[in-house]
Image (cartoon, rainbow, N blue to C red):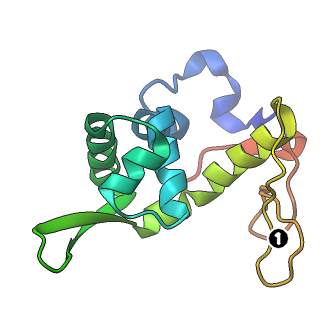
Amino acid sequence: MTVLQGRLANRDAWSAIGECPIEKTMTVLGTKSAMLIMREAYYGTTRFEDFWRRVGITKAAAAARLSDLVEAGLLERRPYREPGQRSRDEYVLTDAGTEFMPVVWAMFEWGRRHLPNRTPLRLAHRDCGAEATVEVVCADGHRVPPEELAVRLTR
């Protein structure tokens, strides 16, 4: 269990509603299609037609999710033009979008380990080939298991 420290320990003295980073993140990325669009962006997808087809959603839903992700700063539009075609936009990860990647890979790892029909897919370190995992690590480099994690106010 994660421990709430300091003033946060008295759960009746404060409310996270509207202020919690988890809540705010879910507002932007709390749909299946948004998460799958982010997955596709990490796999290198940039074109609108490829997003809606690979995620399995309608063009209207893809347009709405892509617009939401651009507005949230996770993707950015970049114009491109194929010879003889009109100008279009592609969608590329921003720094904030890239920083979100561990969340998606943590979901990948959890689903791989805990849901039925386990996939043979694994995360791996491209350079050495060893299996990779997503972990919480403190600023001093220590691995932090869930029972040692705390949430506290900083100034």
Place of residue 124 in the rendered image (x, y in percent of width and height, measured from the top left): 80, 68
The one of 55 and 72 positioned closer to us in this rendering? 55
In the visual, does 28 lie left or right of 39?
left
Quarter occupied by residue 143:
bottom right
The one of 107 and 39 positioned closer to us in this rendering? 39
Quarter occupied by residue 4:
top right
Q: Which residue occupies 69% across, 37% down?
A: 6
Q: Which residue occupies 41% across, 28% down?
A: 18
Q: To which residue does mark 1 refer?
A: 141
Place of residue 54 in the rendered image (x, y in percent of width and height, measured from the top left): 48, 48
Q: Amino acid at mark 1?
A: Gly
* Depicted 104 relative to depicted 60: above or below: below
Q: Which residue occupies 46% across, 38% down?
A: 56
In the visual, does 70 lie left or right of 54?
left
Place of residue 142 in the rendered image (x, y in percent of width and height, measured from the top left): 87, 65
Which element carries disc 1, helix, strand or loop? loop
